[in-house]
Image (cartoon, coloured by chain):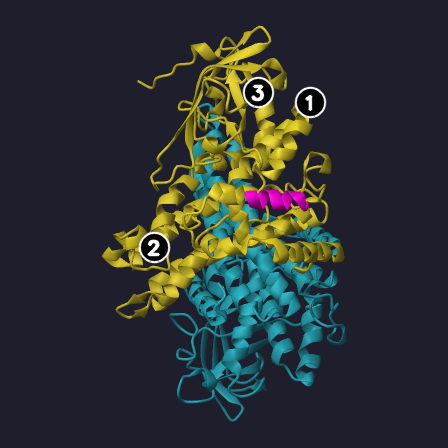
Chain colours: A yellow, B cyan
Amino acid sequence: MNFEDTPQEAAFRAEARAWLAANAPREYEHDLKTSPFGSVRLGGRDVIAASKAWQKKKQEAGWACLHWPKAYGGRGATPIERVIWQQEEGVFSKLSQAFIIGHGMCGPTLMPYATEEQKRRHLPPMASGAEIWCQLFSEPAAGSDLAGLRTRAERDGDDWVINGQKIWTSYAQYSDYAILITRTDPNVAKHKGLTMFFLSMKSPGVEVRPIRQINGDSSFNEVYFTDVRVPDSQRLGAVGDGWNVSLTTLMNERLSIGAGMPTGFQELFDFCLQAQTPEGPAIDDRAVRSKLANYAVRASGLKYTGYRAISALSRGQTPGPENSIGKLVAGAMMQDIAALALDLQGPSGMLAGEDRLAQDTQFQAMLMRSAATRIEGGTDEVLRNIIAERVLGLPADIRVDKDVPFNKIPTRGR
Amino acid sequence: MNFEFSEEQLALRDQARRFLTDKCPPKAVRAILDGKDRYDRALWKGLADLGFMGVAIPEEFGGLGAGHLELCVIAEELGRALAPAPFSSSIYLAAEALMLAGSEEQKQKYLPKLASGEMIGTIAFSEGPGNPSPKNIQTVAASGRIAGSKNPVADGDIADFIIVAARTGKAGGEDDISLFIVDVAAQGVTRTIVETLDPTRAHAKVDFVNTPAESLGPKGQGWRILQDVLDRAAVLTAFEQVGGADRALEMARDYALDRMAFGRPIGSFQAIKHMLADMYVAATLARSNAYYGAWALSTGAAELPRAAATARVSATQAFQLCAKNNIQTHGGMGFTWEFDCHLYYRRANLLALSLGSLSQWEDKLITRMRATNAA
C-alpha cells in the first residue's frame, strides 16, 4: 500500500509537469485561484476567449481529451494518465469548464453513434475548444424523470422538424453544436419513443435565453426550438432508441475520478484558524471542533475513496461503485460548511460580494452555488436511488407510467 | 498509486472470513452473550493455530513478522463476525505496547506467548466517569508497587497480565504518568466481572493493593506511550468497525429485500432505500479512511496520529449508523433478543467507547490537524 507512481506514471507526470511549467497561462493564475466560488472571473478579461486559447494550446501539444484516439484530437492515453494530467493541471483546469459537457458527454456519444466522416469533422474542433458543445436533455417537465421529455421531432422528407423547449443547458449561449434528445413517437411508452440527434446551435429557429440563477450568474440556459430542421443524417442511433443512446452519455458522467469534488472543507478549516470568537479563535471552540471533525473525516473519506478508484485504474481495473458517493457527500457538505462559516461571522455574515468583511473567504458565494450542486447532474435523491438500486441491489421504484403510452400519462398533480 | 491491499493480503482476508464463518457464527457469539463462558476458547485456539495473533509480531518474538496490513484485514473479519475473543486487548493493545516500549527481556517474555495465544494481555487506562486523562488517573505507583482501581478493563478478568497506567508524579500532568506490567497472580490484585452494553466482550473492574509491578518504558513517558498505543489500536479497531458496519448493512439489505409490506418488499420504498444508501455512504467513507490509517500504521508515517483519529472517528460513526439503522429496517423484530441486530448494536456502541469516546477522538483529530496545519 503506497501512494507512489509506477515508473511509467512518474515519467508521464514529469512530462506533464514540464510542459505545464513552460506553457501554463500564469497571467490568469491569481484570478483563477481567487475567483468567487463556482465562478471564473479574470479581472474583466474574456473568460471564453481565455479558455479557448488555453484549450487550443493544450490540444496542439497533445494535452486535450487525453483518453480520445489521436485521430479525433486526443492522445490515446490510459485512464490513469488522464487522472495524472488532471492532478497536474490544477487550477488551470478551471479554464476547461466550457468544454466539460462536450468532452465528457457529447464526444463520447458521437464516438459509437456518429459516422466516421462526422467524427473526423466534429471531434477535433471539440477537443481543441474551437467549437463548444452543449447537451440538450432536461426540460421544464422532465428533470429527474428525463424520459418524460416533450420536445417533438417530426419526420419531413430527409429532415426532422423540432419544436419544444429545453432548460438547464450549461453554456448553450456559447455553444456551436449540441446533442439533442427528442420525442419522435408519443403513442408508445415514454422510454420507447425517443430519438437522439446532433445539430448546429446556429440553426434557424434555435433561441437561447440565459437563466439568471440565485447566485447572479448565468451558466444555465433555456433553449427554444421553433420549426428547427435537422437532417436525418445527424440522427444518433436508431429512431426510438434515444433512451439507450442517452444512457451512453450519462454513463460518461463519471469523469470526475481523481479530480475530486470540491467540499469547502479546506476553506472552512483555514477560516476557523483565524476567525475570532469572544473566547478566542473559532477552532478552539468545542462545538466548532466537533463539527470540523465531522467534515474532516468526510473530506478525507472522499479523498481516499478517490485514491482507491485511481488505484483500480492504475492496475487496469474499472473503479467500483464506491465512486458514486462523491457528489452526494460533497454537495450537502459544502452547503452546510458555508452556513457554519457564516454563522461564525455573526450578523456580518450576511454581507456579500465586495461588501463582505471576511475578505479572504467566499462562503456567501459558496452558500448560493452549493444549492445547485445538490441538484445538477442527478439530485441527491436520484443518487440515493442509484446507490440503493445499482450498488445494494434493492428493487427499482414502482413506475406507474411505465407501460402507458406517453400521450396518456397524466400531466397535472391536481 | 497502489492504495489497496495486495493479492496476498486479500487472500488472507478471505481465509479469515471462511474460518470465522465456520467457527464464529452468530450462535457462537450468542453462547458468550448467554454467559456460557467469558470468551470463546475454541475460537481463540483456532485463531492462534492459524497464526493470526502473531501476524504483526516479529519472527524473533514468535510471530509471523508479516506486518500491520495483514493484521488490518484480519481485524476487519473479526469485527464482521463479532468475534467474542480478547484479540483486541491482547494484540492491538498489549502486544503493540510491548513492541513500542518493552525491553528486550519483556518482549522475549510476553510476545511469543501473546502470538501463540497461550497468554492474554490487556491495558488498564480507564478510571471512573469521563475519558482517560492524566488528571483522572488516580492509581499511584511508588517503589515498584501500585495501588488503585481500574474500571472498565477490557478482558480484565481473563487476562494473564495487565499493563497499568499509573501516577508516578504528583501534578497530574502528562509527565506524571508511567506504565507498569502487573501479573494478575500477584499480591493484592482483585478482579470483579462487570456488566456492560455488550456481554460478548469480557470486562472487569480491577483493584490493586500494594501490588508488585514492573516498569514498561521510561518513567514519566507512560501517557505518551499510551497515546501511541491507542493510535495503533484505533486503526485496527477501525477495521473491526468497518467489518461490523458492512455486515449490519448487508443484514438490513437482505431483510429489506425479503420483508413485504403494503404488497411490496420494503426495500422498494424510498424511505428505506435512502436510509440504506446513507449507510453505504458512511461505510464507504469509513473504509477509505481506515485504509488511510492502515497506510500510516504500516509505513510508520509521521501523520499516523492524524490518520488514526480520522479512521477512528469515521469508523465509529459508520458502525453506529449502520447498527442502529439495521434495527430500524427490521422494525419491531429488530428489537427482539432472537434477531441478531442487537449483537451489532451492542458491539458498535461498545467499540465507540472502548478507546476513549467519539467526542474525545474528534477533539484529538482537530488538535492534530492544527499541529500539522495541513488540513
Question: What residue sits right under mark 3 in the picture?
Answer: A197
Magenta stretch: give its range.
Answer: A53-62
Q: Which of marks 2 and 3 is in front?
A: 3
Residue with the most extreme top position:
A157
Dot 2 or dot 3: first in sequence order is 3
Q: What residue type is labelled 2?
A: Leu
The reply to whether the C-beta atoms of the residues labelled 2 and 3 are less than 8 Å apart is no
Q: Magenta segment: does it hold A330? A: no
Comes first in the chain, label 1 or label 2:
1
Please give left or right for residue B192 compared with residue A369 in the image: right
Amino acid on which the number 1 mark rests in the picture: Thr
Asked if the residue under mark 2 is in contact with the one under mark 1, i.e. CB atoms within 8 Å, the reply is no
Report whether residue A356 is seen: yes
Q: How far apart are the alpha carbons under marks 2 and 3?
A: 45 Å
Chain to which the residue tagged by mark 2 belongs? A
* Disc 1: which residue: A115
With A215 as the anchor, is A38 left or right in this view?
right
Front-most of residues A314 and A98? A98
Tell which circle, 1 or 3, labels the residue nearer the N-terminal end: 1
Give the secondary structure at mark 2.
helix
Which kind of residue does numbered mark 3 sit on?
A: Phe
Viewer-nearest of discs 1 and 2: 1
Marks 1 and 3 on same chain:
yes
Q: Name the residue under label 2.
A: A340
Q: Label 1, label 3: how many angstroms apart (C-alpha)?
A: 13 Å
Of all chains, the one bearing label 1 is: A
Picture coordinates of residue A25, whole percent (x, y): 55, 53
Residue at horizontal 66 percent and vertical 67 percent from the top: B299
The picture places residue B318, in percent across and down from the top left corner, at: 49, 52
Residue nearer the viewer, A44 or B164: A44
Q: Is mark 1 on a helix, strand or loop?
A: loop
